[in-house]
Protein backbone atom coordinates (compact mmCIF):
# COMPACT_ATOMS: atom_id res chain seq x y z
CA UNK A 1 0.00 0.00 0.00
CA UNK A 2 1.03 3.60 -0.51
CA UNK A 3 2.31 4.77 2.87
CA UNK A 4 4.08 7.64 4.56
CA UNK A 5 6.79 7.22 7.13
CA UNK A 6 8.79 9.53 9.34
CA UNK A 7 12.56 9.68 9.24
CA UNK A 8 15.32 11.46 11.18
CA UNK A 9 18.89 11.89 10.01
CA UNK A 10 20.62 12.15 13.40
CA UNK A 11 23.32 14.62 14.53
CA UNK A 12 26.25 12.26 13.80
CA UNK A 13 25.36 11.94 10.10
CA UNK A 14 24.55 15.66 9.73
CA UNK A 15 27.92 16.55 11.33
CA UNK A 16 29.71 14.23 8.89
CA UNK A 17 28.12 15.98 5.88
CA UNK A 18 26.29 12.86 4.73
CA UNK A 19 22.71 14.17 4.32
CA UNK A 20 22.93 13.88 0.53
CA UNK A 21 24.16 10.29 0.71
CA UNK A 22 21.17 9.32 2.86
CA UNK A 23 18.68 11.17 0.62
CA UNK A 24 20.18 9.38 -2.36
CA UNK A 25 19.55 6.02 -0.66
CA UNK A 26 15.92 6.97 0.07
CA UNK A 27 15.30 8.06 -3.52
CA UNK A 28 17.06 5.01 -4.98
CA UNK A 29 14.71 2.83 -2.93
CA UNK A 30 11.66 4.53 -4.47
CA UNK A 31 10.88 6.70 -1.44
CA UNK A 32 9.86 10.29 -2.16
CA UNK A 33 10.68 13.13 0.21
CA UNK A 34 7.34 14.94 0.64
CA UNK A 35 8.41 17.20 3.55
CA UNK A 36 11.78 18.02 5.12
CA UNK A 37 13.45 20.47 7.47
CA UNK A 38 16.52 20.92 9.62
CA UNK A 39 15.92 21.38 13.35
CA UNK A 40 18.11 21.56 16.43
CA UNK A 41 16.03 19.81 19.11
CA UNK A 42 15.85 21.14 22.65
CA UNK A 43 15.23 18.92 25.68
CA UNK A 44 11.46 19.37 25.58
CA UNK A 45 11.22 18.46 21.90
CA UNK A 46 13.56 15.46 22.16
CA UNK A 47 11.95 14.03 25.31
CA UNK A 48 8.47 14.56 23.86
CA UNK A 49 9.41 12.66 20.71
CA UNK A 50 10.92 9.75 22.67
CA UNK A 51 8.49 9.90 25.65
CA UNK A 52 7.60 6.19 25.23
CA UNK A 53 11.25 5.41 26.14
CA UNK A 54 11.49 7.62 29.24
CA UNK A 55 11.84 4.65 31.64
CA UNK A 56 14.74 3.12 29.67
CA UNK A 57 18.25 3.27 31.15
CA UNK A 58 19.57 4.83 27.93
CA UNK A 59 16.97 7.65 27.83
CA UNK A 60 19.23 10.46 29.13
CA UNK A 61 22.05 9.46 26.77
CA UNK A 62 19.57 9.33 23.89
CA UNK A 63 18.40 12.88 24.69
CA UNK A 64 21.97 14.19 25.01
CA UNK A 65 22.85 12.74 21.61
CA UNK A 66 19.69 13.97 19.89
CA UNK A 67 20.28 17.52 21.26
CA UNK A 68 24.00 17.51 20.35
CA UNK A 69 23.50 19.11 16.93
CA UNK A 70 20.99 19.71 14.16
CA UNK A 71 19.00 16.84 12.65
CA UNK A 72 17.11 16.52 9.38
CA UNK A 73 13.51 15.38 9.77
CA UNK A 74 11.57 14.18 6.75
CA UNK A 75 8.42 12.45 5.61
CA UNK A 76 8.91 9.75 2.99
CA UNK A 77 6.16 8.45 0.76
CA UNK A 78 6.05 5.26 -1.30
CA UNK A 79 4.82 1.69 -1.65
CA UNK A 80 5.26 -0.01 1.76
CA UNK A 81 7.31 3.02 2.80
CA UNK A 82 7.54 2.03 6.49
CA UNK A 83 9.05 -1.40 5.83
CA UNK A 84 11.17 -0.22 2.93
CA UNK A 85 12.64 2.63 4.99
CA UNK A 86 13.47 0.25 7.84
CA UNK A 87 15.14 -2.16 5.41
CA UNK A 88 17.46 0.57 4.09
CA UNK A 89 18.17 1.73 7.66
CA UNK A 90 19.10 -1.70 9.10
CA UNK A 91 18.90 -3.04 12.67
CA UNK A 92 19.01 -0.61 15.64
CA UNK A 93 22.19 -2.36 16.77
CA UNK A 94 24.80 -1.62 14.07
CA UNK A 95 26.50 -4.97 14.82
CA UNK A 96 23.32 -6.72 13.64
CA UNK A 97 22.57 -4.36 10.74
CA UNK A 98 22.52 -5.83 7.25
CA UNK A 99 25.65 -5.12 5.17
CA UNK A 100 25.03 -2.13 2.95
CA UNK A 101 22.37 -0.66 5.25
CA UNK A 102 22.73 2.92 6.53
CA UNK A 103 23.44 1.81 10.10
CA UNK A 104 25.98 -0.83 8.99
CA UNK A 105 27.77 1.89 7.02
CA UNK A 106 27.54 4.85 9.41
CA UNK A 107 26.34 3.95 12.92
CA UNK A 108 29.16 3.92 15.46
CA UNK A 109 27.08 2.46 18.34
CA UNK A 110 23.48 1.61 19.30
CA UNK A 111 23.22 5.21 20.61
CA UNK A 112 24.90 7.03 17.73
CA UNK A 113 23.01 5.04 15.15
CA UNK A 114 22.73 7.54 12.29
CA UNK A 115 18.99 7.51 11.55
CA UNK A 116 15.53 6.88 12.96
CA UNK A 117 12.55 5.37 11.15
CA UNK A 118 8.95 4.81 12.28
CA UNK A 119 8.19 1.18 13.13
CA UNK A 120 4.47 0.98 12.25
CA UNK A 121 1.57 2.96 10.72
CA UNK A 122 0.44 4.30 14.11
CA UNK A 123 3.85 5.61 15.13
CA UNK A 124 4.44 7.01 11.61
CA UNK A 125 1.24 9.09 11.89
CA UNK A 126 2.12 10.24 15.40
CA UNK A 127 5.72 11.10 14.55
CA UNK A 128 4.82 12.96 11.33
CA UNK A 129 2.28 15.06 13.26
CA UNK A 130 4.86 15.79 15.96
CA UNK A 131 7.05 17.65 13.45
CA UNK A 132 4.85 18.66 10.51
CA UNK A 133 1.46 20.27 9.90
CA UNK A 134 -0.74 18.86 7.11
CA UNK A 135 0.02 21.95 4.99
CA UNK A 136 3.74 21.19 5.11
CA UNK A 137 3.26 17.79 3.43
CA UNK A 138 3.60 17.94 -0.37
CA UNK A 139 2.56 14.59 -1.86
CA UNK A 140 3.57 14.25 -5.52
CA UNK A 141 1.49 11.19 -6.18
CA UNK A 142 -1.94 12.77 -6.13
P1 LIG B 1 15.70 5.07 17.34
O1 LIG B 1 15.18 4.34 16.15
O2 LIG B 1 15.90 6.52 17.19
O3 LIG B 1 14.75 4.82 18.58
C1 LIG B 1 15.19 4.94 19.92
C2 LIG B 1 16.69 5.01 20.05
O4 LIG B 1 17.24 4.68 21.32
C3 LIG B 1 17.33 4.03 19.11
O5 LIG B 1 17.13 4.43 17.77
C4 LIG B 1 18.77 4.01 19.62
O6 LIG B 1 19.55 5.03 19.02
C5 LIG B 1 18.61 4.36 21.10
N1 LIG B 1 19.06 3.24 21.95
C6 LIG B 1 20.08 3.27 22.80
N2 LIG B 1 20.22 2.10 23.41
C7 LIG B 1 19.25 1.29 22.96
C8 LIG B 1 18.87 -0.06 23.23
N3 LIG B 1 19.52 -0.82 24.12
N4 LIG B 1 17.83 -0.56 22.56
C9 LIG B 1 17.13 0.20 21.67
N5 LIG B 1 17.45 1.48 21.38
C10 LIG B 1 18.49 2.02 22.01
Image (cartoon, rainbow, N blue to C red):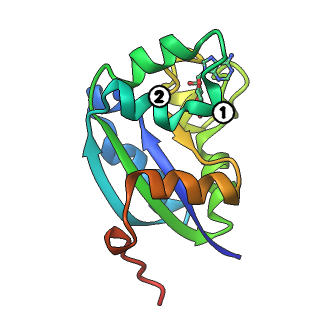
Look at 47% across and 52% down and name the residue there: 25
Is 109 in front, or is 61? 61
The label shown at residue 47 is 2
Mark 2 neighbour density, 10 Å: few (under 14) some (14–19) many (20 or more): some
- Alpha carbon of mark 2 to alpha carbon of mark 1: how far? 31 Å
Mark 2 CB near ligand 1 (8 Å cut): no
User: Image height check: is 88 above or below 41?
Assistant: below
User: Image height check: is 115 above or below 76?
Assistant: above
Seen as rendered, the residue at the extreme bottom is: 142
**On-image quarter of the N terminus:** bottom right
Look at 63% across and 26% down and name the residue there: 53
Which circle's residue, 2 or 1, is located before the other in the chain?
Answer: 2
Look at 53% across and 39% down and name the residue there: 116
Query: Which quadrant of the figure shows ligand 1?
Result: top right
Classify residue 74 by image quadrant. bottom left
Whether residue 82 can be seen here: yes
Mark 1 CB near ligand 1 (8 Å cut): no
Q: Is residue 82 left or right of residue 71?
A: right
The label shown at residue 99 is 1
Mark 1 neighbour density, 10 Å: few (under 14) some (14–19) many (20 or more): few
Classify residue 139 by image quadrant. bottom left
The kind of secondary structure element at disc 2 is helix
Amino acid sequence: ALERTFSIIKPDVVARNLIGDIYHRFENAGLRIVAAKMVHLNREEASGFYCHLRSKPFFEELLQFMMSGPVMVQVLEGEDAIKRHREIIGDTDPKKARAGSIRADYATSIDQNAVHGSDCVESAEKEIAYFFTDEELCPRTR
